[in-house]
Amino acid sequence: MTIQSSRTEDAGAPRTRANILLAAIRYVFLRVGVLPFFLVFSLVVFSLISNQFLSIQNLTNVARQSVYLVLVSLGQMLVLITGGFDLSVGTAIAMTSVVSAMAMVALAPVMPDMIWLAILLGAGAGLGAALLIGCLNGLGIAQFDVSPFIMTLGVQSVGAGIALFLTGGVPISGLPYDFGNFFGFGRVLGIPVPVMIALLAIVGIWLLMNRTKLGSHIYAVGGNVRAANLSGVNTKRVLFLAYVLCALLASLAGLLLTARVESGETNLGGTIALESIAACVIGGVSLRGGLGRVENVVLGAFFIVLLQNGMNIAQIGSYMQMVLLGSLLVLAVILDQFRYRMLVGDR
Amino acid sequence: MDNANTPLVEMTRISKEFPGVKALDGVDFRLQRGEVHVLFGENGAGKSTLISILSGLYRPTSGSLRIDGEEVDLRSVHDAARHGIGTVFQEFSLIPTLRVFENVYLGRELKRGPLTDRRAMAEGARALFHDLGFEIDIRRRVSTLSRAEQQMVEIAKVFLGKARVLILDEPTASLTEKETRKLFAFIAKAKADGVGIIYISHRIQEFREIADNISVLRDGRLIGTVSARDTSEKTLVELMTGRAIDQIYPEIGRQPDGRTLMTLRRMHGAGFHGVDIDVRAGEVLGVAGLVGSGKSRIWRSVLGLQPIRSGTVTLKGRDVTHAATRHMLRGGVYYLPPDRKGEGLQLAATARENIKLNLLGRAEIVGRLGIVAPRRARALADKIGERVGIASAHMGRIVSKLSGGNQQKVLFGKGFGEERDIYIFDEPTVGVDMGTRAALYRLIKEIAEAGKAVVVISSDLPEVMNLTHRLLVFSKGRVSAELTGTEIAEENVLKYFFAETGIQP
Ligand SMILES: Nc1ncnc2c1ncn2[C@@H]1O[C@H](COP(=O)(O)OP(=O)(O)OP(=O)(O)O)[C@@H](O)[C@H]1O
Ligand SMILES: [Mg+2]
């Protein structure tokens, strides 16, 4: 029966400058999470390595590249906040790409004078395919209580199989020129179309999460499902919609990617599930659900693309990049646990 | 159909079966407009189940339900709310990660066009809390509130809706006098407006003040409905248990000169400022005070559950200030947390497993090589279960499926796994019925008379006044009075609840 008194936290220490700095770091960590620290760290490191890194041109480039991850991360955020996650976002992208490309290739010769209608129908078909994936996930998780891990893992395999089956593994080329030209490379008011679409999506999802009933209910379900149910929230509907919206946002990214590469491909969303979860977690979304902010997730996605860009400039090989990204994710989760305990744990 | 004679709520021959349990068996229940109807009964009698059916949470196995004379089939809480039924559940329905006002408006958000109007909701919540006299910052996250504060939010939630039927399942379990007064005033107001109120409580002394009728349940059956005015407490307890209980609070002998086991000196921390306390062997020390007075937080900081800013804690001559919780426990301190769901219990495990968990250190169940003998552990757990009044049929059930009071008994039982020197009970009998309370008080008596130190922190005034030898009253983070013997009287204690300064010599 030994009692050790650990005097780690000394009471009444003087408010030195170091103390104030520490308090500030603690405050930012609690409010926003690990992201600001990661961001500052990588900005410093990469700008030391290369002076091109912080150039306007490179940063614009990063912004354009990050559009796809931002969209998927927004969707991923919705389901993470409900307390689940979606491993099938990559499949939603692949299905969208393949189905929309096939539809456009088939429709374009039939209606040569109405090429925009063909593009619209094709895009609709792609979104429809992803909608199906979202409904499947939502149904399994909300209605049949399948764990999100198993459900989305299963759907991921099913969807990938179907996409490969449809194409035989060969990319679908011969898409209407206007599709790639507008959605891949076009500009509106001087802003690249993909960036424009991403901005609209960010505003839309921000409004959803902060200013609508559904948004509050998504937070509530993730915070405590039973309590949400006792408060009269239709928890099944909320879960279902979260997975559907997630798939649709991934699908939107899929369409833009397809326009960018100008062909329908099954491997467009390869690592995006991991990357989007990483973006969210680094952006302060709690894996336990109930916590997470749109603006931080957007920054999180931006950070990951920035990191990849920086590593490319620093000539770090893609294999090593995988190692670093994975480690970063785990580190972010560990720090998130600390944060959660500090936020919710101490009364 | 607003005929004055049709009851507001009429439940007929309601039965409810859970797998292996008949929670309700042919219960009839009526509620009139402007009536306060109390449901009374032992833990597990079926009170919460009955009101859960009326709240749309459970559907009855058989029986019918009429509201305003109209037969209804409630499929969800949402459904019930549409029929004007508002419920404070025994199990809290708050989202820890959301703010207070977001919780209050959850499920009925105010909108402006297609968007929610957060400003209006914050304003509405602020006004409501002001009217209710609950002092809580509506922008705080619920996870940072104490249990009592959460209860206030829970209550505010139902008073926000325009309910025709208000159901309150043990709303005062964690509240002190002051908040309870406010709540009763609100209930009286709702009653005058013709709202029907169903009120569940184990605090029998509250009934005379607010109730019109009392329905007594036992083992899922309705024993009878009596008028609150004409029925004595003694009769009620007899109806509830089927036998007479002569004495709830036992006479506890006090060791004349018990050794001081723990001393707190000049303790400062969040919620308490400059507190000195001695904890002595063979004595029951009571700690009373309003919500937020620091009566609970000081002990949490002693246990290492929240930081101590300055001051010293000495345990049996050793300095244990800032010691980690596990060191305090190993040093012979037992702590019963007030929040059984949050900190006390493994909800997915059975009652027996929960008790067994604390037995792992006991010599008699650990054989050679440090291997636990399962049969002996089980027997010992069952013996402890019996001591704290858990029916043997309940020992094998998952804790989250037990009634609230029975969960509390499991928590209590965990304390008897190991021999300790100091027992700190924070709200030991929240939601426990009278019969079981008497049994738990007898256990406290045994512990104290065996020479252990006992600390009872409680918002239940009769409890702390009757059990304790020495009573500390907390006010605004300070000890405003230390009362012994005949000084422990209600007016005296209440006076010091609101004292502005520290102890007057
Ligand atoms: N979801 C459930 N699954 C299985 N059994 C349950 C469930 N809910 C309640 N029970 C059982 O039904 C019986 C009645 O429980 P109920 O919660 O209605 O009691 P109570 O009168 O409210 O008790 P208390 O005063 O302790 O709150 C108990 O035996 C309980 O174990
Ligand atoms: Mg109950």
Image (spheres, coloured by chain):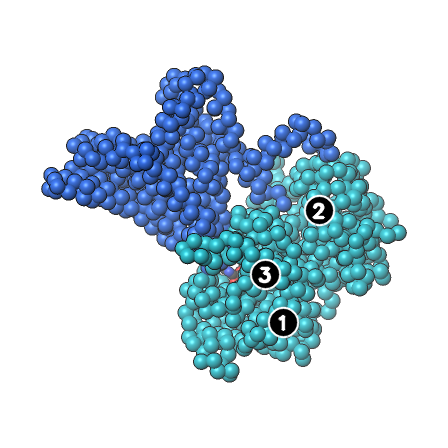
Q: Which of the two discs, 1 and 2, labels the residue nearer the N terminus?
A: 1
Instruction: Report which quarter residue A118 is drawn in.
Output: top left
Q: Colour of chain B?
A: cyan
Residue B123's x, y, as percent? 56, 56
Give the camera-side residue of B336 and A307: A307
Between label 2 and label 3, give the one nearer the viewer: 3
**Front tag of 3 and 1:** 3
**In this view of the protein, which residue sits in the foreground, B111 or B8?**
B111
Q: Residue furthest front?
A: A189
Is A272 or B315 nearer to us in this picture?
Answer: A272
CA gap, disc 3 and disc 1: 16 Å
Labels 2 and 3 in the same subunit = yes
Q: Chain of mark 3?
A: B
Give the CA separation, mark 2 to mark 3: 25 Å
Residue B264 visible from this viewpoint:
no
**Which callout, 3 or 1, points at the residue further toward the start of the chain?**
3
Q: Answer above or below: position of B211 versus A240.
A: below
User: What residue does disc 2 label?
Assistant: B271
Q: To which residue does mark 3 refer?
A: B128
The residue positioned 22% from the left and 36% from the top of the image is A179
Q: Is residue B485 left or right of residue B400?
A: right
* Mark 3 and mark 1 residues within 8 Å of each other at the beta carbon: no
Q: Which residue is mark 1?
A: B188
The amino acid marked with disc number 2 is Gly
Tag 1 and tag 2 share a subunit: yes
| Residue type of the residue flagged with mark 1 | Ala
Q: Is residue A29 left or right of residue A196?
A: right
Q: Which chain is blue?
A: A
Say what amino acid the circle numbered 3 marks: Leu
Of mark 2 and mark 3, the one earlier in the sequence is 3
